[in-house]
Amino acid sequence: MQEFDIVIRNGMIVDGARNPRWKGDIGIRDGVITRMGKIANPRARRVIDADGLVVAPGFIDLHTHYDAQVFWDPYLSTSGFHGVTSVVLGNCGFGFAPMAPELRDRAMKSMTKVEAIPLVTLETALPWDWTTYPEYLDSMDRAPKSLNVLPYVGLNPLMIAAMGFEDAKSGRMPTEAEHAEMARLLHEAMDAGACGFSAQCLGTPGQPQAGTVGGAAQNDFDGTPFPTDVMWPETRMRMAEVLGERGEGFIALSMGLTPPPEWEALAAASGAPILWQAVVPSGDEMGAGIRRHLLDWFTSCHERGLRIYGQGITQDPPLIFTFDYFDLWSDWNAFVGPDVPREQKLANFADPAVREKLRALPLKYMFIDAIPDTRLHRSFSEQWKSCEGQRLGEIAETTGRHVIDVVCDIVLADGLRTIFETRQFDTTLAGVKELLDNPYIIPGLSDGGAHLKYLTCGSYGTELIADYVREHKLISLEEAHWRLSSLPAFCAGFRDRGTLREGAAADIIVYDYGKLAYTFPEFVQDLPGDEYRATNRGSGYRYVLVNGELTIEDDKPTNVHSGALLRNGRVRRQPAKAA
């Protein structure tokens, strides 16, 4: 008779709890780790020889936008290709529930801009068999999943449901009755299994005309701020008080201009961990100064018993983009943005008058490389093929052209297919080290499921181990796995995973430390509606187990859908039927 379903033997176990690594065996039965230590003569359906490999808890990705992708991609890639076994979705206040039927089209259009998800993809793939938040979770529960999913309540749809669309967008202070309805809806969602709430608060309360800190990149599809961008502090406090009443939950907020006292008041009222998004590894003097102030503040908060953490951008993969879909240089959108028809884009690139207007625009935009520092990654024309890998400024200097004319000439020669490469946040190794040196920073901000036309940051866990543990030795492997699994599990309320221990869910990665790597981003045509996206892959992952079943073997999906919706942080078991 089998004692175990799977036994992993002779692996170097890094348990995620900061304990020293040790060589041993792990026995798994019914999706749970039932024994750790030496298992002699194992009786199991399968025995995995992990000699020479690291055995660790699967990564937990706290910042994703797989709210739609969960309905068409069981592996939630790119996260699922990079050792991630559980994700939290519903970030930045975005979401699709609660949602009145007449607002579904509007909700999908919002995601086409801020998250670069094609409208035809959403229209093709979303089942829309819900109106309430509990019904949304039921629908998600039915979808096949190879990863575990834990959901936030995004406050945008919640505010719209309580106030009406126009009033929620107007920045009006909610009435007491509207605040009470928001509280009721949050309670309802938490009862159904949500882990807390999220919001992007990048505007000015009550002033929708002021826009957002992130500018066009973070606005709604029509250029206006989202409801949470103009929400009042009183509304955030009412939602925090709901979590305080319940004694559970987690909060994720993007509101960098909000003074620390409000954050501290929210932490005190809710009693919940709060995630400050996001702390960047910028090398410029101002960015470094802001980061160091935040790191000191996180330490001070924890000394006073306030659980405020920072989500650190500890990854530096390039963004790749084409002008087939483009909105990174926001001032260009009127001429070549996503809403401009293809033939008109080509005409505009060729028009001397348009080029003159483009030359008058800024060369630097928020969060990414300046235009001269952007690189030509791939050209499809013989004329420009030899320039691949060069900065646009270098090409301009070599050819005697203005850098804007270089962009226009290459894109015209390629018929909009040119692939450009840029990087984010002026990332430096010293900046990443400062983030990793602070124990209150959760590494990685994957944005998985978002910015599909250019971003592939679901590889953050692979990058952390391959680059910052193995190559640069910024932190130990034990510390890295604690940050990637146990700490996020603690914050978000995962009840039985995040570390390897007897009785824990068997979410396990087995990888070749020396060969762990991630690929350069590429475009693939695999979205519903025959649309493309950017993605990348991980290598060195010999085995990935989710709830005790193999979902990845030798870097390849097994098409096993053993993931689960983790309501309130755990798998809810159906009660046994009476005999």
Image (cartoon, rainbow, N blue to C red):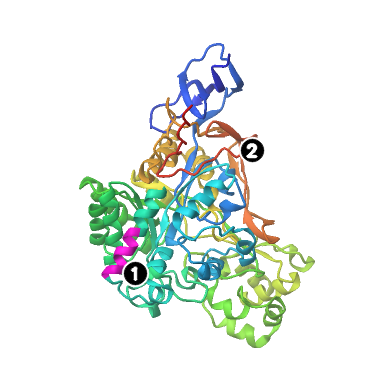
Which mark, residue 231?
Answer: 1
Left or right: residue 379 versus residue 477 is right
Identity of the residue furthest to the front in this view: 579
Amino acid on which the number 1 mark rests in the picture: Met
- Most foreground residue, 524 or 408: 524
Left or right: residue 553 versus residue 34 is right
Q: How many marks?
A: 2
- Most foreground residue, 242 or 310: 242
Instruction: Classify 553 as above or below 446.
Output: above
State the extent of the magenta-drawn residues as a range. Answer: 176-184
Instruction: Classify 67 as above or below 348.
Output: above
Give the secondary structure at mark 2.
loop
| Magenta residue check for 394 | no
Instruction: Classify 556 as above or below 232.
Output: above
Question: Of marks 1 and 2, which one's residue comes earlier in the chain?
Answer: 1
> How packed is label 2: few (under 14 Cα within 10 Å), some, or many (20 or more)?
some
Identity of the residue furthest to the top in this view: 41
Query: Residue at the location (70% across, 63% down)?
Result: 387
Q: Quadrant of residue 518?
A: top right
- Residue highlighted by disc 2: 555
The picture places residue 319, in percent across and down from the top left corner, at 57, 59
